[in-house]
Image (cartoon, grey):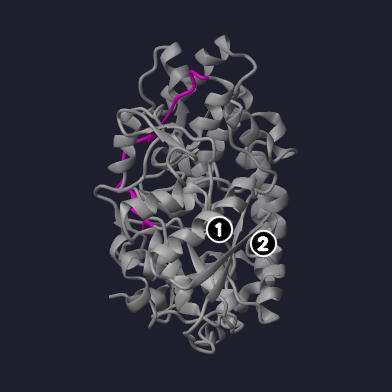
Amino acid sequence: MKKIVFLVLGVAICAASVFAGGKGSGSQTGGTREVTFIIYGDKTDRMTQFMANDMPKLLAEKGLNIKMNLQVQPWTEYASSQIELRYASGEDFATWTDMPFIARCAGKGYLYDITDLIPKYAQSVLREIDKASFDSFSLNGRNYGLPIGNIPNASVFFAVTARTDLMAEVGITDLKTLDDVEKFYTTAKKLHPDYMGVAEGSPTDTYGMVRMLSRYISDKNLLFLNELVITDASANNAQIWSYLESDEFKKYAAIARRWNQMGIIDPQVLSDGTIANSKWLASQAMFRNGNAGRPWEEVGSMKAQNPKAALRSFFVGDAKGPLVSRGTYSTAFQISVNAKHPEAYLEVINLLYSDQKTYNYMTYGIEGTDYTLNAQGKIATRPNLQVIMPEWASNNAKWQIFEGYIDNAVINDYLHWNDGSILQKDIGFIFDLEPVKVEYAQIQAVTNEYVPPITYGFVNYDTAYPELLRRLKAAGIDKYMAEFQKQFNTWYSTKK
C-alpha cells in the first residue's frame, strides 16, 4: 500500500467509553442530500474537474439526489487532533480511518453507528468485501466504519520485494534463503555501487525490517500484535511474548549487525527517515519488505527513472505456517455522528462496487481521457492517476485493470496471494492502554532511544542489550506485558 501503513500501533481506549458513539440525528430524505468526503494526499486539477463535472453525471444517472464534495488534506492530518476537532465542532463528513482511530472517536461520541444502515444502503460492499473486514471495524458488534478495498494482503510486509531486473543481471532467480539475499546484494553492488541495499529505515522504526526475515529467525508463525508484542499466528491459544525480550529479536539483531557491516543497511537511515523510500522509488535500491501489491503498485514510479525496473515479492526462510490475513480491506470510512444523511455516504461508497463499469469510472476515470487500454485489456496510457480516490484505497482485485507493463507472473502472484491463508487471531481486539499508560510512555522513550540502533545494526546486540533490558524493566515492561496478556486472554476466551 502506498504512503501509509494501516496498522497504527500502541493506541487504545478504555473499554467503558469505546461504545459511547451515538447513532446520530438520523437520516433525512427529500431534496438534494449533501455529503463531504475527506481523503489524504495531493489534489490535482483533474480531480477538481472530475468532481465538478463527471461525478455529478454518474450520481444523476444512478438516480441519487446527492451532491458529493471532496476535500483532500495532507497526510499529516490523517487521524489527527485537527480531524477530531472537526468532529467535535459538529461538522458533517466522512474520512478514511483505522481501528484505533475508530475506537478513539467512537469513545468520544463522534461517529455514526452505521450497523443498521449497511444491509440497506451498502449491499454491493457487503457482496464484495469479506466478513473479516467488517469484523475489523466492529466495536461490541456494532460497525462504526465501512471497509473498502478487496485485495490480497495477507502477511503484509513479511515478504521481500526485490528488483528482479537486477537479480537477472547477476543470475539469481529466487530469494529463498538468507544466503540468496546476501549474494544478490554483493554481486549487484559490484555492478551498481551507488545503489542502496535494503530500502528500509527510520529513526523511530523498531520492527519494520524484522518481519521480512521472520520465517528465517523463528520456528513459529510470527504475528506482531504491536511493536512490543508477538504471538504465534498458527497456535490456537492466546499466548503472547515480548518481542524485545525474545530469541527472535536476538537472532534478527545479529543479521542486522552483519548487514550493517556489509553495507546492505545504509548508514543514513537513522538520521533521514525518507531516504530509503526515495532511493527505492528512484530505482536506486535493491530490495525492501513487501506484500502482494508492492510489485505492481510501485514499479511505475521506478520505471520513470529506469524503464528496465521490475519487481516481485519473495518469502525468505521456510514456511512456519500459512500466511495471515487481517481481512481484504484497504481502509475504511467513518462518518460523523452529526451527518444529516448518513445513508447517502453509504450509497456513494456502494456505487464503487455496483458493477465493473461504475468501478472503472470511479477508480480510473473516463476511458480515452484519463486512461486508454491496449489490445490485451491492460492500461496502455494513464495521464490522470487519480480522479477521486487513489487506486490502492478502492481496489477490487476481481475488477482492477493492471498497467500494460506489469508482468503476468506478478499479476498471478497477486491474485493468488491469499490462497490458503488464515485470519489473524486478534481481529476485533483493542488493547485498553489506560491501566499501563504511564509504563507505556516510559517504554516508548526507552525504545525510541535504544532500539533503532540495534534494529539497523549500528551497535552490537551483546554490548547494547543489557542496558536496553535494564531500562525496559525500569520502565515497567513486565507490568505492560502482564496487562496485555490478561486482556488478550479475556478477549480470546470470548471467541471460542
**Vertical position of residue 179 compared to residue 399: above or below:** above
Say if the magenta span includes residue 320. Answer: yes
Q: Residue at x 64, y 41 (%)?
A: 454
**Vertical position of residue 490 compared to residue 258: above or below:** below
Specify whether 56 is left or right of 460.
Answer: left
Decide: few, some or many residues near mark 2? Use Cα within 10 Å; few <14, some 14-19, many ≥20.
Answer: many
Q: Amino acid at mark 2?
A: Ile
**Vertical position of residue 49 compared to residue 160: above or below:** below
In the picture as drawn, the residue positioned furthest to the right comes out as 271
Asked whether the beta carbons under mark 1 and mark 2 sit within 8 Å of each other, the answer is yes
Q: Earlier in the sequence, mark 1 or mark 2?
A: 1
Our reading of the magenta stretch's main secondary structure is loop
Decide: few, some or many residues near mark 1? Use Cα within 10 Å; few <14, some 14-19, many ≥20.
Answer: many
Q: Residue at x 25, y 47 (%)?
A: 419
Which residue is tagged 2?
443
Say if the magenta span includes residue 64. Answer: no
Counting from the top left corner in percent of width and height, residue 87 is at 65, 77
Front in this rendered view, residue 300 or 385:
385
Q: Residue at x 70, y 81 (%)?
A: 89
Counting from the top left corner in percent of width and height, residue 73 is at 67, 57
Which residue is tagged 1?
228
Q: Amino acid at mark 1?
A: Leu
Q: Secondary structure at mark 1?
A: loop
Counting from the top left corner in percent of width and height, residue 411 is at 33, 35
Range drawn in magenta = 307-328
